[in-house]
Image: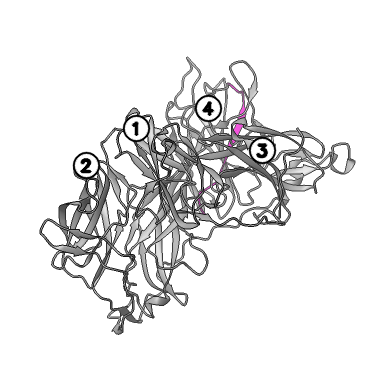
Amino acid sequence: MARREILTDVYGLILIIFCALSFDADTVSLSASATQQQLPAIVVGSPQSGDDWPISTSQVIRWARNFSIAQGNPSDVKMTVELLGEAGSQELLLDDGRADLTPELGDKIMLLRLTPPSYPATLEAIRLLVPTIMGQSDREKPITLYYFADDQGRNSPPPVRQFLTQPARVRSTGSFMDIPIPSGPTLTAGDFYVGYEIEAPAGGFTFPVDRNNTQRRTFIADRGGDEFQDAMFPDANGVLVQGNLMVRARVNVSATRIALSPAGGVDNVGEFCWRVKLSEGQEPMMGSERRTARIRVSALINGEEVAVGQSDQFTISRALQSIRVTSPAAGEIWRDQEERIIRWTFERLVGGVRIELLHFIDSDSEPDEVVCLFDGEPVVAGQRSWEVGQRTPGFYKVRVSSSLDFRIFDDSDLFVILERADKAAGESLTWEDWAPLAPSPPPVEPLPSLCTMCGDTNYQLAQTSPSIQLVTPNGGEVFEPGDRVKVTWGSQGVTERVRIVLYDLSRNAGNPEVSPQLTADNTGSADWIVPLRLSDAVKIGVLSETNPSVGEVSDGVFTIGIPGQGRLRILMPDGGEEFEVGTETRLVWNSEGNDVGDKVRIDISFDGGISYRVLCNDVRCTDASNNGEFRLGLNFPPSDQVRLRLVSKSRPWISDVTNCSFRIIAPRPPDPNAPKCPPPPR
């Protein structure tokens, strides 16, 4: 660790927060006293229980660096970081819970295509919301459920005759009801198709249709028919529109284990920045949907695990900023020289978008060719016309990404490009002819045993000088009085209790106000109730109760604000980006509540958030308009540890910082092999 400040506590002790931890130490043998000896534990302090990490945000995973190891030299340790998907029942849905249309369609079978978050996944129940026609009896009417497990991921349902069916009765209307599926099918890849058949309108029911999700995954067939078609519904004016059937599925999924860190691991620096994303093939999230997970951190020497730890359970939620490609849609056939419209929707984005064509030749899910079609198209336009040029017949997707942050993107569903319709070779081909050849993502492996060194083993424990390392909170957080905050730390050679101390630097950073908070057993974590103290510059320390020179204070400051006074949230940049010296990007944020005020201050840090300075000395930075956007010129020396902080001018305890550091790098010469993307003539 870098040099620390010298802080004086209320008891007159000088708390010298020491230099970097040294892992150079002798080791002693420790024979396993019993079989199934567990590995030494790593304290993983972030994420914590109650944390919610939106997709496409950068988040810091933190752990204590000062842990024991089972064997080997601590200097050889590499860390691996993994996402553990939770096993158990999960609900699959595409709707927002509100029906936009209730078309009275007679004698139809309607289906929805749903993709599990992980595999294997077993269908447990189908959840229905069945509206009734005014004045008709609505209870105990028969319906027929239809379901099918498509392990090929063909994007369109098979013929009706291949579906499994189950009779059921409508027990309630106005809310979703669960209908169990005994011995439901299991998928190791691909999609479930679930739906039902009703006698409408004579049976007294209608189909509920949601138009909120831009994905179109609903199919319809005539009762007694055999082929499903893309569903279209009449609106109040009789115009045919698209939407999704409001039917859900409850599935039981196995735990999954997904590597987040690169192959070979990362250095033991105590933190890892992760750009939150779903696994390949997972459905985008809707509304308030959450998915539960944990983070696993392990230490490896020569490929063998020597210590391991897991985070609390946390949730992953829908993206704060997003792009969703709505056209081309699944199964469409586009042809050479046709004029087509590429369409997208977006949330909380500014600037332009880049539009690329992805060509899939092999049977895997990775594109074999990427061609840039347009760059710099205004994101607010929501569409771009494109004349389909001469392409090799086959499978394609369209990718639309933010020009400011290429990690914010979406790919369309798979579609086919063929030659012109007047050429006989391709004139009669349909999607059904191509679907069996479509590429599909590889199956996600179920979670293997997490203990790689259980059994009779002679372990060694690294012996180090006494140390305490604070994990969380470590700077940048925003708390409110009364919040219950989990303080986490790791320790070596410390057996006594610890003291948790609060330092307020807002009035005098050189001589902070010190406030003891609590003492706790040295278990690696303790709950702390945030006091009523308004400050935008607070640190916390964990110290040995009997030897206060053994301890550590958080690297950066955090904020204690007033409940209900508003919030600032930086959306872009939020960590992991690279910008060249002299280029320009945009700082984008979301402001909630009138108490934030109409002016904000913009600060910058070059040491990962340990210290900040005002971005610039004129009113553009010290009194910036709180309008959610600021053009940011990056005329600074190269740095790997850059963060931004946004502070309310009227209430400085309302603030936010970029979650992870981003990089400013020296200008690079143009890459002659980079794909060129000039805007074509309109």
Q: CB of mark 3 within 8 Å of CB of mark 2?
A: no
Instruction: Give the alpha-carbon distance from disc 2 to disc 4, as whole Å.
Output: 43 Å
Residue under the image location 45 percent in, 61 percent down: 82
Amino acid at circle 3: Ala
Mark number displayed over residue 596: 1
Amino acid at circle 2: Gly
Instruction: Give the alpha-carbon distance from disc 2 to disc 1, as whole Å.
Output: 21 Å
Q: Which residues are magenta?
A: 104-120
Amino acid at circle 4: Pro
477 in relation to 593, above or below: below
Nearer the observer, 481 or 167: 481
Mark number displayed over residue 329: 3
The crowd level at tag 1 (other Cα within 10 Å; few <14, some 14-19, many 20+) is many
Q: Is residue 157 visible?
A: no
Indicate which disc, 2 or 4, sits on the residue closer to the N terminus. Answer: 4
Indicate which disc, 1 or 3, sits on the residue closer to the N terminus. Answer: 3
Residue placed under numbered mark 4 in the picture: 208
Nearer the observer, 90 or 657: 657
Q: Secondary structure at mark 3?
A: loop
Instruction: Give the alpha-carbon distance from disc 4 to disc 1, as whole Å.
Output: 41 Å
